[in-house]
Structure formats: C-alpha cells, structure tokens
Image (cartoon, rainbow, N blue to C red):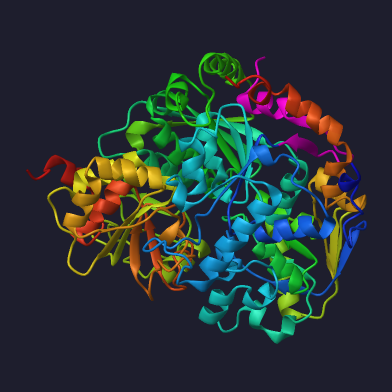
C-alpha cells in the first residue's frame, strides 16, 4: 500500500482569498474552444499554453484584453455568464493559470470548467450581473485597482465596490482546508473504494 | 416518494462524503483517449502511482487520427507523437487499447456502447465533455478534465457534488424529416446553453421511448451543449435488446441477472424531480443553427434573427455574416460534414444516404462522410452506403473525430461555411479561426450538400428520385 500513500500535491495549501489586479473579458457563453483553440491541444504537455490564450479572438480583435499591456500581471479575470462552456479541455484553465490568473469572478461558470480550475487552485466566484459589469467597468478605467476576492467571506471588494461572491460550498470548504486538489483524499481509503466496487452488481456477478 | 435513476446510481457508487462535503464517487468505467490523457499519465509517473483498476479502464485513439491514410508513422508528426504516447502509456500501465488494427477503433463515445462496455447503472468518466452520450443506455456519465483523469486513473474515483435533476418530456410524435438532432437542438434553444448548469437532464416521454439507442445517444450527447454535464434515459427493452450479444455485455444467465438489476435502477414512476419541462414534438421542425453557440438556432422555415436584439445575437451575426431577417433556408454552403460522436453512427449514415441516393453533390461543395467507428464503416459498406455517397461525390473517410473539431488535418479553410452533423458551432471550432458552422441533422446536411445551400430536407424526402 506504500504506493498509495501520496505526499501532498505540490502547492496545495489553503486558499482563503485572492488579491491582485483584474482583467475584464466581456461576453456571455465564452467557450473553451475560444479560450484555447483545439490546434494547441496537439501536444503531450501543458507547457507554453499561456501564449495561445484567446489566440484567434486576439487576432480578430486588436484591443482584446489578453493582448492589452494595461492588464499585464492581472491575477483576477472578470467575466460574465456561463464562462468556460463547451469542451472539457483542462488546457483552457491551464493556459489561464500559466498566464498568472489566480481567481475568476463572473456571473456563472460551466461546471466542468469550474472543477478543472479548482483542481489548479483557481476559485471561481459567482457575482450578480450588476457586480460583474461594475467590476469590469472599474478595471477598464483603473487597471491597477486592487481587487480582493475572499473565499472565506464570499465577498469581493475593489475600490468603491463591495459585492457578495459565492464559491459553491463544497469547493469553498475544499479551498479553505487546502483540499482543492483531491487526489490525496481519494487515495486515502482504498479499502472502502474496493468495498464499493465489490458490492456493484455489474462488477460482482454479471460474468457468465 | 420514489427515487430517480440519478439518485440510485449515485448512491450505489458513493464511497464517502469528503470533509468538504463533496462526494467521493466510484467510477465504474473510465474511457481514455490520446488528447486529454498524456499529462495525466505523466503525473502518475511523477508520484509513482499505478492505475488502480486497469480492468475498468479502456483507451482508444480518435481525435488526432488521420481519416485518409492509417499508415504508420502518420505523415502528421503530432498525430504520430500523440498516438505513440498513448500506446506507450497503455502498455506501461496495463490498460487495454483499441487501435485501428483491431478493426474496432472509433470515436470513444461511439465504441463504448458499440462494444457493450457502456451499460445501465454504471458511472462513466472520460476526459471529454461528450461523455454525456453514454447516458443513452441509462449510465451516469461525466466529462472530466485531465487532472480528474489523473484522479480516476490513480483512485478510480472523482470528487463531485451531486447536481439537481431536471426531467424533460418530449410528448406527441415527431413529423417525418424531424430527427433526434432537431429534438436536442430545440431543447437547447428553449432552455438555453446555460440552462442546464447545475442539473443532470433525464429525458423521457413517448418520443424518447420510441427512439432507438442511436437516436437516444444523439440526444444525450448534446446535454453538455445545454449546460448539463450529464444526461440520461432510463433503460428499457430497447436498451436491453441493444446490449444483448455485444462483446463486453453480460452473456448467458448473467445477461438475465443484469437485466433484472437494470430494471431496478430506472427512475421510479413517483420519483421526485427538481424541475420538469415538457416539449410537444409537433412544435419541432428541422433545426439549423445560425450563430456561434448551439442554442442560436431556428426552424428551417424561420428567418435568421435581426440585429439589435442583444449583444450575443449581434456578436454572432457579425461573425457569421449571414443574412439577418432572411430565412435560414437558402444559406449557401461550401462544405458538408457527416460524422462525429453526435451523428456518426450507422443509422445517421442511412438517413443521409436516403437523401443522397441517385443525386449529386452541388458543384463547388466539398462533402465528406466520416463514420464514427470502424464497425460503423464496415456495416455501412456491407449495405452499400459508401458507394451511394461516393457516387454522389462525397469523400468516404476512415473513422475518427475529424472535422468536428479539426484536430487532425480535416479542417475548414478561411471563411468557409460548413453544414455539419456535429455538436458545436463555436467560433473557430472546425479548425479555421474564421470558419463558420451550421449545425443540423445528418439528413439536413445531406440535403444541403446536394442543393449547395440550406434546404428543408422534407422537400427531398417527398421526391426521392428512382
């Protein structure tokens, strides 16, 4: 069983808040094909993906936020509704993480994307439409504005803005406990896993 | 109050509640492909972990595979590297791998059910969002990311929160020329591309009950396009008949034992749902997308929306550059693609061939058929479908994901407009950053290929040439 006793994954500590400047990305239903076009999935590692974030959108839109030096060094991405929909490619949040994004604030998120981001230590904070829009406007006007997004209090503050920002309860608790990368937990009690498997009819007695 | 299939299957696979409140869920079947797994295998090696249940793990190659020549090494250097990496990883970790030389390779969501790997009552995970397809057989199937692929490889478990369950009934009867694809496009249009976030979709009602497993897979496949991570249909006699005799399905007495259990996991008649929606089949038309997400669609008899409605519509209209306010029928196309995990199965090719038989692809249109698996391809060839398509001017290709997402060399070029039987019309989805996709049923794609423009397939069903 020694193989199944993992060391805690590197960098997996509690995350109670994310602080930094923002980058606004307006629009609903931004899919992961746009965040990371499929041709950049033609690789066996995640290395260098940050260079290809929104590559086609940036080509089509010269003032795209991810090509705009005003937002260089941003830690918090501010989006609208259903961000990260579509493909389950982790390459999308991997690219964002490698570009320095540590938290995402938006109206709502695709579940697969939100889960993929969480495993990388990136909380997704849900705010209402008005708060997302106001925060985007604030950051557009004042790119060096410091945003504080608190996982524990469910709150974002940025200059004059103070808004409720929810992380789903189970993910919130996982961030606060430093268990957002769950591999170690999942490997902890292999006997119980084996027990569930052994009780499943299709694994136990569907063999001729 | 009774329980839903979702609840019964979730509970049967629950290992424990994690300290965060998430469920540690056992995964009964893990499907693996070349695009989302190499980094996961690397992480296993880094930690010195083995694959916990290699016998519950199955791999194939689909996204990157060329559809013209399978000679190794592939001319496409990255296709060769990614395929070779999967072969190495499967060998090292003892995972069964279905390659083209087996004659059973194909898109992971086509071959899972085809081989009988997918069964009612299972939990299934795969590093691909269209894993929801497997719900058609009454399984609970989730798309996952690469870190979760690592978790499932190492522990056969996922940390998840249970979604709510929305029951969607399709009542009445579909008109001729209206297919499963039109049903799911209509569901997404009505409920929105984000309407299913936080939900699993349970599809039912008389229209779904009458559907074949192929049709049910088309429905469940696109659950994720409506925001629902999982979609499923309760197993019934159609499901059991589909599974009987398949390679990995139970056989002999075991099949009867399996059917007995499968019956018990279906949702109870008095099950409690978090939400219910009913859609009357009579209101569903052949449906075509005009925008940049699968919810932006109209019936073939309707006009494309005008500008000025909302920002999302304007953005889509600007990108697509079609004719706002004009009927979607008549939109010229450059490419016709029949294939994908949504609509690349035998019955899809049969429906398309009914339209194509005795006709010719319009001049200037590039048309291709990419069967979902080698088995689909062989079965189609036995029925002479390949000849029908070839004679009409279609290219008949090898099995894979192909132009659904353009990860191999099958891609749109420039601003081409593609009538496609696939699942996503996102900007750049089919391999050209500026390419344009119109989603529709395979029969509608076939009709568009012949006409050179979007056309109501029902007009062609009425006058099939001798």
Which residue occupies 61% across, 25% down?
B5
Q: Does the magenta stretch include residue B2?
A: yes
Which residue occupies 73% across, 84% down?
A70
Q: In which quarter of the image is residue B205?
A: top left
Camera-side residue of B442 and B32 = B32
Camera-side residue of B157 and B129 = B157
Q: Does the magenta stretch include residue B114?
A: no
Which of the image's four quarters has the C terminus of chain A? top right
x and y, in percent, of residue B172 in the image:
36, 26
Name above or below for residue A5 compared with residue B88: above
- In the rendered structure, the answer to whether residue B221 lies left or right of residue A134 reads left
Asked whether the viewer can see residue B385, the reply is yes
x and y, in percent, of residue B452 in the image:
21, 62
Q: Quadrant of residue B351?
A: top left
Name above or below for residue A132 compared with residue B227: below
Which residues are drawn in magenta? Answer: B1-26
- In the rendered structure, the answer to whether residue A67 lies left or right of residue B328 reads right
- In the rendered structure, the answer to whether residue B412 lies left or right of residue A34 reads left
């Amino acid at each position: 069983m020694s193989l199944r006793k993992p060391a805690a994954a590197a960098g997996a500590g509690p995350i109670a808040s994310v602080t930094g400047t923002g980058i606004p990305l307006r629009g609903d239903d931004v899919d992961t094909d746009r965040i990371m076009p499929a041709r950049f999935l033609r690789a066996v590692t995640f290395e260098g993906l940050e260079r290809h974030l929104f590559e086609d959108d940036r080509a089509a839109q010269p003032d795209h936020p991810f090509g705009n030096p005003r937002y260089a060094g941003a830690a918090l991405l501010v989006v609208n509704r259903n961000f990260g929909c579509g493909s389950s490619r982790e390459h999308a949040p991997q690219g964002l993480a490698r570009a320095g994004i540590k938290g995402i604030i938006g109206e709502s998120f695709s579940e697969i994307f939100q889960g993929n981001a969480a495993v990388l230590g990136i909380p997704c904070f849900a705010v209402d439409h008005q708060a997302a829009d106001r925060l985007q406007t604030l950051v557009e006007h004042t790119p060096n504005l410091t945003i504080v997004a608190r996982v524990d209090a469910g709150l974002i503050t940025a200059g004059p803005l103070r808004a409720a920002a929810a992380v789903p309860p189970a993910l919130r608790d996982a961030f606060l406990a430093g268990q957002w990368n769950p591999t170690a937990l999942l490997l902890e009690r292999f006997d119980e896993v084996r027990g569930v498997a052994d009780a499943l009819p299709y694994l136990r007695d569907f063999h001729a | 109050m009774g329980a839903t299939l979702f609840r019964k299957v979730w509970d049967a696979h629950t290992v424990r509640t994690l300290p965060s409140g998430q469920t540690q869920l056992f995964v009964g079947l893990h499907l693996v492909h070349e695009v989302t797994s190499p980094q996961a295998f690397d992480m296993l090696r880094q930690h010195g972990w083995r694959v916990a249940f290699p016998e519950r793990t199955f791999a194939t190659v689909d996204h990157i595979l060329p559809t013209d020549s399978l000679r190794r090494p592939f001319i496409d250097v990255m296709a060769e590297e990614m395929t070779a990496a999967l072969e190495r990883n499967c060998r090292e970790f003892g995972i069964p791998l279905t390659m083209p030389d087996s004659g059973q390779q194909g898109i992971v969501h086509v071959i899972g059910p085809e081989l009988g790997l997918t069964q009612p009552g299972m939990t299934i995970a795969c590093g691909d969002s269209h894993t929801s397809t497997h719900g058609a057989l009454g399984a609970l199937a989730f798309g996952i990311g690469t870190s979760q692929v690592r978790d499932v490889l190492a522990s056969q478990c996922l940390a998840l929160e249970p979604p709510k369950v929305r029951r969607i009934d399709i009542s009445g009867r579909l008109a001729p020329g209206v297919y499963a694809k039109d049903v799911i496009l209509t569901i997404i249009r009505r409920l929105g591309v984000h309407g299913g976030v936080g939900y699993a979709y349970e599809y039912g009602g008389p229209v779904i009950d009458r559907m074949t497993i192929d049709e049910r897979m088309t429905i469940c496949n696109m659950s994720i396009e409506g925001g629902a991570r999982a979609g499923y249909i309760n197993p019934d006699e159609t499901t059991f008949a589909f599974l009987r005799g398949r390679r990995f399905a139970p056989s002999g007495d075991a099949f009867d034992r399996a059917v007995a259990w499968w019956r018990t996991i279906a949702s109870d008649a008095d099950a409690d749902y978090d939400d219910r929606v009913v859609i009357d089949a009579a209101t569903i038309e052949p449906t075509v997308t005009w925008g940049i997400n699968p919810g932006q669609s109209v019936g073939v008899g309707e006009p494309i929306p005008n500008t000025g409605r909302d920002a999302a519509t304007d953005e889509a209209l600007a990108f697509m550059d079609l004719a706002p306010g004009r009927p979607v029928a008549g939109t010229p196309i450059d490419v016709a693609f029949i294939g994908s995990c949504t609509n690349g199965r035998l019955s899809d090719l049969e429906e398309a061939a009914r339209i194509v038989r005795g006709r010719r692809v319009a001049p200037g249109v590039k048309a291709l058929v990419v069967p979902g698996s080698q088995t689909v391809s062989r079965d189609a060839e036995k029925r002479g479908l390949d000849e029908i398509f070839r004679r009409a001017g279609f290219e008949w290709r090898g099995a894979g994901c192909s132009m659904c997402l353009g990860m191999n060399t099958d891609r749109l070029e420039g601003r081409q407009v593609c009538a496609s039987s696939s699942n996503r019309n996102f900007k750049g989805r089919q391999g050209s950053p500026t390419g344009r996709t119109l989603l529709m049923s395979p029969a509608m794609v076939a009709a568009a290929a012949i006409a050179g423009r979007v056309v109501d397939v029902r007009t062609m069903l009425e006058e099939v040439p001798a």
